[in-house]
């Protein structure tokens, strides 16, 4: 999600995919990030996922990105995703150091601590997009469906359970049914998006002003596709 030093802002504004040698050398600058609209940030994430699926990621120079971001960071988005080891957002979106804030929790749910983190990312640090990223075959969702109880995990799964009840599905409503688990995971993403809007007047206000977008997505573990939800 980087832009080249010379034509960076113009290329970003045009939504053009940048060449790897231009894109990997340094982290986003404030000028490059601020030049983008929320829709352009989303488009860049989609293009990053397309590169990931094609096996043609940018040639990231992580040491250069580390050096360029050491004195300041200007991420374009904050991503709320699951802790699942198979769904690392930075890799799936082909981003580098300094491109995105990343919050991970089982079931990609929202709570007060994560809301505070997202408010910092957008209201204080200038991120343009809040992306909630669920995924297929989510163990937390399956656990919520099957009423799993395990220490502190029990309370976390309770946050997901409203999505179980809200999901319309005519087949077997079990954590063993992969199709139902994925359907609930999708509902859970949409409910998390609405929960963020409801419980954070700061983020909801920024979205109403057009300064940010709060969007949901589902990542398919099998084909690598990240689908943005309406």
Image (cartoon, rainbow, N blue to C red):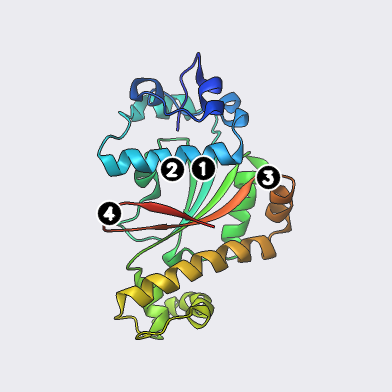
Instruction: Identify the mark at residue 223; answer none if there is no mark.
Output: 4
Separation (CA) of disc 4 from disc 3 = 34 Å
User: What residue does disc 2 label?
Assistant: 46
Q: Secondary structure at mark 1?
A: helix
Could you tell which of marks 2 and 3 lies nearer the N-terminus?
A: 2
Question: Is residue 159 in view from this perspective?
Answer: yes
Category of crowding for the residue at label 3, using alpha-carbon neighbours closer than 10 angstroms: few (below 14), some (14–19), many (at least 20):
some
Query: Relative to 45, does residue 176 appear above or below in the rendering?
Result: below
Category of crowding for the residue at label 4, using alpha-carbon neighbours closer than 10 angstroms: few (below 14), some (14–19), many (at least 20):
few
Residue 129: x percent and y percent? 57, 46
* Residue that sits furthest to the front in the current view: 170
Instruction: Identify the mark at residue 147; answer none if there is no mark.
Output: none
Separation (CA) of disc 3 from disc 1 = 18 Å
Say if mark 1 contacts mark 2, CB within 8 Å: yes
Separation (CA) of disc 4 from disc 2 = 15 Å
User: What residue does disc 1 label?
Assistant: 42
Query: Relative to 23, does residue 196 appear above or below in the rendering?
Result: below
């Amino acid at each position: 999600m980087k832009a080249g030093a010379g034509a960076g802002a113009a290329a970003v504004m045009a939504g053009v995919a940048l060449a790897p040698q231009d894109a990997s050398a340094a982290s986003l600058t404030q000028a490059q990030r601020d030049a983008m609209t929320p829709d352009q940030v989303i488009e860049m994430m989609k293009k990053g996922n397309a590169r990931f699926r094609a096996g043609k990621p940018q040639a990231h120079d992580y040491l250069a990105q580390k050096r360029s971001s050491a004195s300041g960071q200007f991420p374009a988005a904050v991503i709320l995703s699951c802790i699942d080891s198979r769904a690392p957002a930075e890799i799936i979106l082909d981003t580098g150091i300094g491109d995105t804030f990343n919050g991970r929790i089982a079931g990609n749910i929202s709570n007060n601590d994560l809301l505070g983190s997202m408010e910092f990312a957008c209201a204080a640090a200038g991120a343009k997009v809040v992306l909630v990223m669920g995924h297929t075959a989510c163990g937390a969702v399956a656990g919520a469906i099957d009423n799993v109880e395990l220490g502190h995990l029990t309370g976390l799964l309770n946050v997901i359970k409203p999505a179980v009840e809200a999901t319309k599905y005519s087949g077997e409503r079990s954590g063993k049914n992969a199709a139902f688990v994925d359907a609930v995971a999708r509902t859970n993403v949409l409910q998390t998006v609405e929960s963020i809007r409801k419980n954070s007047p700061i983020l909801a206000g920024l979205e109403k002003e057009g300064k940010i977008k709060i969007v949901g997505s589902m990542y398919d573990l099998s084909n690598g596709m990240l689908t943005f939800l309406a």
